[in-house]
């Protein structure tokens, strides 16, 4: 009777191969959702984003975010999140 030494690499190689094949099969069977926006929708999104960014910049420039009401609201929210 001839006994050969089995290396660790041989032991790990087969399960790895099986795992990789299983992953490939799952990828073939998986379906992904996707959304495509029309050029008009993308343009509207960009326009709305620019308007919103400009409004935020105006509030920063006017000191709105440094007002007592805003500071208290932010502090209350921070406390609420840390107390959860």
Image (spheres, helix red, strand yellow):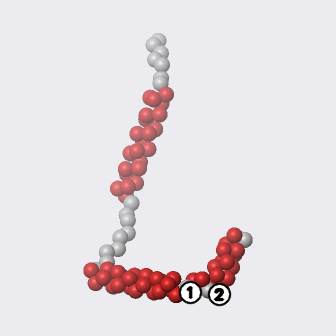
Q: Quadrant of the C terminus?
A: bottom right
Tell me if 74 is positioned left or right of 43 in this view. right
Find the residue positioned furthest to the top.
Answer: 1
Residue at 72%, 71% in the rendered image? 83
Q: Secondary structure at mark 1?
A: helix
- For mark 2, what is the residue? 69
Calculate the distance from the C-alpha at mark 2 to the C-alpha at mark 1.
9 Å
Give left or right: position of 21 versus 39.
right
The image position of residue 3, as x and y in percent, is: 47, 15
Q: Which mark is residue 64?
A: 1
Residue 69: x %, y % from top left: 65, 87
Furthest residue toward right: 83
- 74 versus 5 height, above or below: below
> Would residue 73 be seen by someone viewing this image from the given angle?
no
Left/right placement of residue 66 relative to residue 10 reads: right
Q: Position of residue 44 (x, y in %)?
A: 33, 85
**Residue 21 appearing in the image:** yes
């Amino acid at each position: 009777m001839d006994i050969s030494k089995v290396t660790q690499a041989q032991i790990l190689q087969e399960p790895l191969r099986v795992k990789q094949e299983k992953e490939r099969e799952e990828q073939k069977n998986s379906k992904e959702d996707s959304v495509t926006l029309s050029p008009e929708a993308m343009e509207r999104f960009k326009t709305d984003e620019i308007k919103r960014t400009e409004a935020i910049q105006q509030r920063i420039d006017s000191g709105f975010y440094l007002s007592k009401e805003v500071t208290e609201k932010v502090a209350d929210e921070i406390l609420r999140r840390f107390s959860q």
